[in-house]
Amino acid sequence: MPLVKTGVVIADPFVTVADDAALPDAPALVSAARLLAEGEALLAHAHPVGVIWPNNKDVLELAPFIGRLALVALVFPKFRDGRAYTQARLLRERLGFTGELRATGNVLRDQFLLMVRCGFDALDVAKDSDAAAVEKELHSYSVFYQPTGDGRPTPLRARLGARPA
C-alpha cells in the first residue's frame, strides 16, 4: 500500500516488527501489546519507535510514552468504524502528540480530508490511484465550520480575530 505524507507518496522508513522479533537497526513499528509490556526498553532503542494502536484501545494509555514516540499508526478496520478519528483528536489536542500520526487499514479516498482535519499527517492508502488523488481531495474545500486540530480557523474565529479592538 502506498504511504502518502503531506500529499506526496513516500517510502515507509519504519519496519513493522513482530512481537517476538528483535528490533532492527532502523526505525521500528511495534504492536500496542509490545509497547505496553516493554515500553522503556523499546524507547531506549537507537532509532525512532512507533506503535500500531488498534481503535478499540484507549489512547490515554499512550500518555507515559507520548513525548518519545515518533509515530502512532491508528487502525481503521472498516470504513464505517470511526473510532480512530476520535483517537487522533485526543492524541493531538489532549495529549499534545506532535509526531507522525498515520491512518492505516481501510483508508478511503472520501475520508482523506476528514482524516487530515482530525490530525493525521500520513495516510496508508489502499490503492495507487487513491495516492494520486490525495492532494486534490485535501483541497476540495476551503472553509470549514467545525473546529479541529489542524490549525485552520472557522469562519467565526476568523471574523472574531479580524475585529478591531
Image: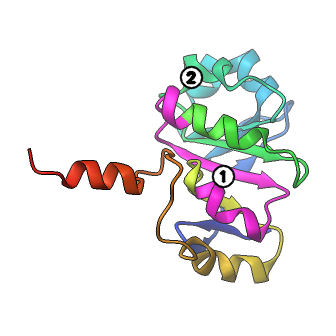
The quarter of the rendered structure image containing the N terminus is bottom right
Residue 75's image quarter? Answer: top right
Q: Residue at x 67, y 83 (%)?
A: 132
Cα separation, mark 2 vs mark 1, equals: 18 Å
Instruction: Decide: is 11 above or below 13.
Output: below
- Residue 110 within the segment the image draws in magenta: yes
- Residue 2 within the segment the image draws in magenta: no
Q: Where is residue 86 drawn, in percent x and y?
A: 68, 37
- 160 or 76, which lies in front? 160
- The numbered mark, 2 or 1, whose residue comes first in the sequence reads 1
Residue 73's image quarter? Answer: top right
Residue 23's image quarter? Answer: top right
Reading the image, the residue beneath label 1 is 14
Q: Residues within 10 Å of mark 1 (few under 14, many from 20)?
A: some
Q: Residues within 10 Å of mark 2 (few under 14, many from 20)?
A: some
Inspect this view and state whether residue 52 appears. Answer: yes
Inspect this view and state whether residue 13 appears. Answer: no
Instruction: Decide: is 28 above or below 62.
Output: below
- Which marked residue is nearer to the observer: mark 2 or mark 1? 2
Do tag 2 and tag 1 residues touch (Cβ < 8 Å)?
no
The tally of labels here is 2
Reading the image, the residue beneath label 2 is 65
Instruction: Decide: is 153 above or below 45.
Output: below
Q: Which amino acid type is marked by label 1?
A: Phe
Q: Residue at x 68, y 35 (%)?
A: 87
Mark 2 falls on what kind of element? Answer: helix
Q: How is the image coloured?
A: rainbow
Q: Where is residue 152 drawn, in percent x and y?
A: 41, 55
- 118 or 40, which lies in front? 118
Q: Which residues are magenta?
A: 92-116
